[in-house]
Image (spheres, helix red, strand yellow):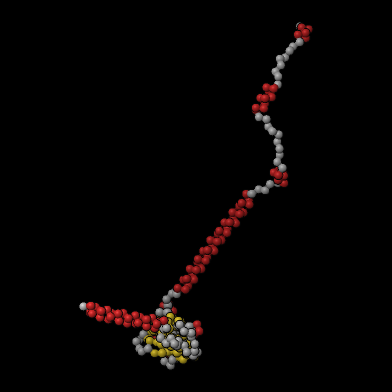
């Protein structure tokens, strides 16, 4: 019984080891792969030029051997075909009939930009456009595709950019209005305070600087003291004067 348990443990250990090695290989594979970024969907007006945007990320420095390839898969379900190739600073447009002399390079390898432009888009150009980049030794590419649809001008979806610009302008305008109101209120209060203020004359200023000294006032108690201090002598009449008069 113990031998069976040990054997099962060894087998499980080997399985876990194999799984760990597989995970490490996958991580190493992804870490050295070129990552490509494109929009998922693109609407183009009929008869106009379309820019197929593609950027990439690589752990290696880009140089002359960095290569870009664009492929096309039509909505009709036909096979995938290469329509453009770029390497060593040179463009190689595909000879596929519908795209002949219509594709131009619009990227910059040094900026990790692999975009192209397609002139005179037609409804027959509807389909998936696939961007692939290799940057040796990063030769594995996680490619991305753009689902493109050519429509008439009136059927183009509304872009979010004008809406965002309108919102930003509205916010800035509101802030300016609020700031103007606050400034006007401050100016009004300042003028009002100046109007209610009355300045003093030179005489008033001198009087304010040289205080006037008044004599001390006597209180009722002092008056009573004066009354008590004055003697009330009786009036004496000369009897001889009265007798002579009589």
20 left or right of 133? left
Quadrant housing residue 78? bottom left
Residue 226 in the image: state x and y as whole percent.
Answer: 69, 24
Position of the C terminus, as image quadrant, is top right
Residue 119 in the image: state x and y as whole percent.
Answer: 46, 86
205 left or right of 121? right
Quadrant housing residue 141? bottom left
Position of the N terminus, as image quadrant, is bottom left
* Residue 244 seen in render: yes
Q: Closest to the observer: 209 or 136? A: 136
Q: Residue at 27% of width from left, 81% of height from top? A: 11
Give above or below for 184 relative to 3: above
Q: Residue at 60% of width from left, 56% of height from top? A: 187
Badge count:
0
39 left or right of 194? left
Q: Closest to the observer: 15 or 32? A: 15
* Residue 99 seen in render: no
Q: Residue at 43% of width from left, 86% of height from top? A: 138
Q: Closest to the observer: 147 or 22? A: 22
193 left or right of 52? right
Residue 16 in the image: state x and y as whole percent.
Answer: 31, 79
User: Furthest-left residue in view?
Assistant: 1
Give above or below for 101 relative to 149: below
Q: Residue at 40% of width from left, 86% of height from top? A: 140
């Amino acid at each position: 019984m113990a031998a069976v348990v040990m054997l099962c443990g060894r087998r499980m250990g080997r399985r876990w080891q194999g799984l760990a090695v597989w995970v490490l290989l996958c991580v190493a594979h992804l870490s050295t792969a070129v990552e490509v970024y494109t929009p998922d969907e693109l609407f183009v007006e009929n008869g106009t030029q379309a820019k197929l945007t593609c950027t990439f990320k690589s752990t290696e420095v880009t140089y002359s051997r960095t290569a870009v390839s664009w492929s096309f898969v039509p909505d009709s379900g036909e096979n995938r075909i290469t329509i453009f190739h770029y390497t060593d600073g040179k463009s190689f447009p595909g000879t596929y009939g519908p795209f002949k002399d219509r594709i131009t390079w619009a990227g910059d390898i040094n900026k990790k930009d692999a975009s192209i432009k397609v002139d005179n888009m037609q409804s027959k150009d509807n389909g998936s456009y696939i961007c692939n980049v290799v940057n040796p030794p990063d030769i594995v590419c996680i490619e991305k595709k753009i689902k493109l649809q050519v429509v008439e001008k009136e059927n183009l979806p509304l872009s979010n950019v004008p809406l965002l610009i309108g919102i930003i302008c509205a916010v800035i305008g509101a802030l300016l209005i609020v700031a103007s109101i606050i400034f006007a209120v401050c100016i009004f209060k300042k003028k009002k305070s100046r109007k209610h203020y009355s300045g003093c004359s030179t005489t008033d200023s001198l009087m304010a600087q040289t205080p006037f000294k008044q004599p001390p006032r006597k209180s009722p108690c002092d008056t009573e003291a004066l009354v008590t201090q004055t003697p009330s002598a009786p009036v004496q009449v000369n009897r001889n004067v009265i007798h002579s008069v009589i």
